[in-house]
């Protein structure tokens, strides 16, 4: 049951970061199953709604629009590449325009540059790009909704050894967005703004510098709080952990490859994958055992966490089921061109994921007073 | 390695058949293909116990055009379009459903379940794997093309399917006019088995439909007994249309069926606007909700 204050309003608090990541991962898996533009647009709308409803006011939480821009760039690149590297054209295709054909030598005849660009090929490229863009936006939504610094705390203890690397890799995207916003604001306050390439340079350099500096600063702060400490571990147990993890990761990669490549024997796929994950689990367990850590203000896992992560995972499961029952509706054909259908089950699944915007508690105000909900009107602008 | 790269080659090469003048390419009766004009395409269905289907097309043409005429048709993948050939069907084999029937053809099929595309230019007696995709290959007159399943090179030689006559037989041409009216049937040529095709040992196990079709066609083609052609390889000489190839014939018990020049029906796109309206309404509703929430938050804070 959602916690409520005496006034009937739900108490604002940050949702457990893992719940948001599970929700976003579920949506990303769901997206990867379909190329139906209606469903993809619906996923984007769901992401937009949940982010706008449940993000906090912190700097890293305001980055969703940058992910949207990034998504647009992904789609554009995809379409441009498909046009330049000419794709199959049959007499039934609708030709949009023709690019000049670059002649290729005989040994390179398999790749054609230029040629007629059909509407079907461009749409296919755009939909492919849109699917990738949706997955990017899922990650973006998780980055905007889940506090990256609190997400670091739920990492398994074995990864603490990698302290700085893990901190930088997890927090660099949110930090980058935070830096972009700060540099942009500073430029707006200054006179004599430059446009074009020079303007870009005056943004890019300070942003990269700032983001990296702040990530390192965070890593140093984490280090001072016990990250990267090996504790009481002996050299032998450290080596055992490292070996188990390394073998496990190699097994995971090889098993994945075996699963995806049909020419390899079946024994190479799932068994190796399972062995790899077992080794990884063993390594993490061995690493966890020797790192003792206490946490101040642990993130609770209550009903809203179950609802949010459950809605995302259920969405993924329903789309996988729908994909095996009626794959044609999830991947509508562009040859011949036709309006995509709107399958009922995936629509319900995606709308189910939108309930996270209601199930999650409202986000805390920027300067929360401990134990008491802050009325929205009295928030202090920092 | 080559096999794995092949679908990519088919995709990347299948570009830009416009401007190559393919509009005039049509399917011809097999007798119209000679050593110098027309292109013969052979599709090997023996993986499913079927025959090698042989068709003839006029030049200029493309490999894609050739394998999409005369009862032959291809299916691309839903993801990459018709140029990425996933399935090949022949109207006289397995009801024209196309093989491999067990592939969904939504995305790239595995390398073990893909068609490979082979060329032999006039005078060549061995196959070369095509460096370009079917839609991007413009074979010269007298060339032979082969499609085999599973990636291996064809188990029949270019000579065994190539036209041997130097000029189209006039009688064959007149018969082709009557066959365009739809009264005709494929000619079957069970190689090195001069008996009735239905008694083929290969056909006994799993390909009853193919064998049935062959025997039926053999029976029906008796009506064409009055159209003998001048050369042995490319025509039906016997009263039942059965021909035994000589030394040029393939070593295996390969049946070669000649495809008929009938136009393949084109499917046209359709769909209703209703899903678009419903989907658009849901997306707009969610976007409106997001906008309202943002506005509310902005007002509050």
Image: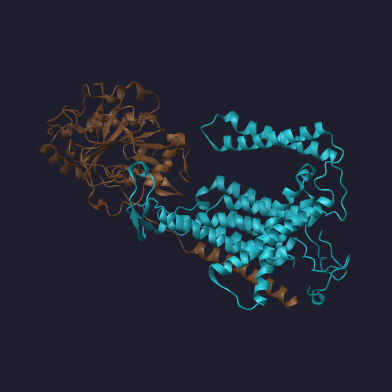
Chain colours: A cyan, B brown
Placement of B236 over or under B264, stated as above or below: above
- Left or right of A78: which side holds B187? left
The residue lying at 14 percent from left, 40 percent from top is B173
Percent from the top left, x then y, of residue A59? 72, 66
Percent from the top left, x then y, of residue A282? 76, 35
In the image, A168 versus B216, the foreground residue is: A168
Q: Is residue A205 visible?
A: yes
Q: Is residue A310 visible?
A: no
Percent from the top left, x then y, of residue A199? 58, 69
Quadrant placement of the N terminus of chain A: bottom right
The residue lying at 12 percent from left, 36 percent from top is B169
Placement of B149 over or under B265, stated as above or below: above
Quadrant placement of the C terminus of chain A: bottom right
- Left or right of B278: which side holds A118? left
Percent from the top left, x then y, of residue A292? 87, 43
The residue lying at 22 percent from left, 51 percent from top is B24
């Amino acid at each position: 049951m959602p916690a409520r204050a005496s006034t009937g309003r739900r108490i604002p608090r940050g949702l457990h970061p893992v719940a948001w990541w599970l929700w976003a991962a579920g949506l990303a898996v769901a997206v990867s199953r379909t190329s139906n533009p209606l469903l993809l647009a619906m996923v984007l709308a769901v992401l937009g709604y949940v982010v706008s409803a449940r993000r906090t006011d912190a700097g890293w939480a305001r980055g969703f629009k940058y992910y949207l821009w990034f998504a647009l760039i992904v789609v554009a690149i995809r379409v441009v590449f498909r046009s330049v590297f000419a794709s199959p054209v049959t007499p039934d295709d609708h030709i949009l325009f023709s690019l000049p054909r670059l002649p290729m030598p005989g040994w390179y005849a398999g790749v054609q540059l230029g040629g007629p660009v059909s509407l079907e090929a461009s749409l296919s490229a755009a939909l492919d790009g849109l699917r990738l863009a949706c997955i990017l936006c899922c990650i973006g939504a998780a980055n905007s909704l889940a506090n990256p610094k609190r997400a670091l705390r739920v990492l398994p203890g074995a990864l603490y050894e990698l302290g700085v690397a893990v901190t930088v890799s997890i927090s660099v995207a949110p930090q980058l967005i935070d830096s972009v916003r700060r540099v942009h604001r500073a430029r707006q306050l200054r006179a004599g703004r430059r446009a074009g390439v020079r303007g870009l340079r005056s943004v890019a350099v300070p942003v990269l510098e700032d983001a990296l500096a702040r990530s390192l600063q965070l890593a140093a702060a984490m280090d001072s709080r016990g990250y990267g400490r090996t504790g009481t571990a002996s050299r032998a147990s450290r080596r055992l952990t490292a070996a188990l993890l390394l073998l496990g990761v190699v097994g995971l990669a090889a098993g994945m490859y075996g699963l995806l490549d049909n020419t390899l024997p079946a024994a190479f796929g799932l068994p190796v994958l399972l062995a790899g994950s077992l080794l990884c689990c063993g390594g993490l367990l061995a690493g966890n055992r020797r790192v003792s850590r206490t946490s101040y203000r642990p993130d609770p896992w209550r009903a809203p966490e179950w609802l949010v992560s459950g809605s995302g995972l259920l969405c993924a499961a329903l789309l996988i089921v729908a994909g095996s029952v009626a794959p044609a509706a999830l991947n509508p054909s562009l040859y011949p061109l036709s309006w995509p259908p709107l399958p009922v089950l995936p629509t319900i699944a995606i709308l189910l994921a939108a309930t996270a915007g209601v199930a999650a508690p409202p986000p805390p105000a920027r300067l929360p007073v401990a134990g008491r909900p802050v009325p929205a009107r009295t928030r202090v602008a920092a | 390695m080559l096999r794995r790269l092949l679908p990519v080659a088919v995709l990347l090469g299948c570009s830009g058949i416009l401007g190559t003048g393919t509009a005039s390419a049509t399917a011809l009766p097999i007798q119209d293909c000679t050593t110098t004009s027309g292109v013969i395409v052979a599709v090997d269905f023996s993986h499913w116990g079927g025959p090698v289907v042989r068709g003839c097309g006029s030049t200029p043409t493309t490999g894609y055009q050739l394998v999409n005429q005369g009862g032959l048709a291809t299916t691309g993948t839903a993801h990459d379009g018709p140029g990425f050939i996933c399935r090949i069907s022949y109207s006289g084999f397995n009801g024209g459903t196309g093989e491999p029937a067990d592939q969904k053809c939504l995305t790239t099929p595995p390398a073990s379940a893909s068609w490979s595309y082979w060329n032999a230019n006039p005078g060549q007696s061995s196959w070369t794997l095509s460096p370009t995709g079917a839609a991007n290959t413009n074979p010269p007159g007298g060339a032979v093309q082969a499609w085999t399943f599973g990636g291996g090179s064809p188990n029949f030689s270019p000579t065994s399917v190539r036209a041997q006559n130097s000029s189209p037989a006039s009688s064959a041409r007149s018969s082709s006019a009557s066959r365009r009216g739809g009264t005709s049937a494929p000619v079957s040529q069970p190689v090195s088995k001069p008996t009735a095709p239905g008694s083929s040992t290969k056909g006994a196990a799993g390909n009853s439909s193919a064998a049935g079709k062959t025997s039926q066609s053999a029976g029906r083609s008796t009506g064409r007994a009055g159209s003998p052609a001048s050369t042995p390889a490319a025509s039906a000489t016997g009263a039942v249309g059965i021909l035994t190839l000589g030394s040029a014939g393939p070593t295996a018990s390969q049946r070669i069926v000649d495809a008929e020049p009938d136009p393949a029906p084109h499917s046209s796109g359709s769909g209703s606007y209703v899903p678009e309206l419903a989907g658009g309404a849901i997306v707009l509703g969610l976007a409106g909700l997001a906008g309202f929430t943002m506005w509310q938050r902005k007002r509050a804070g």
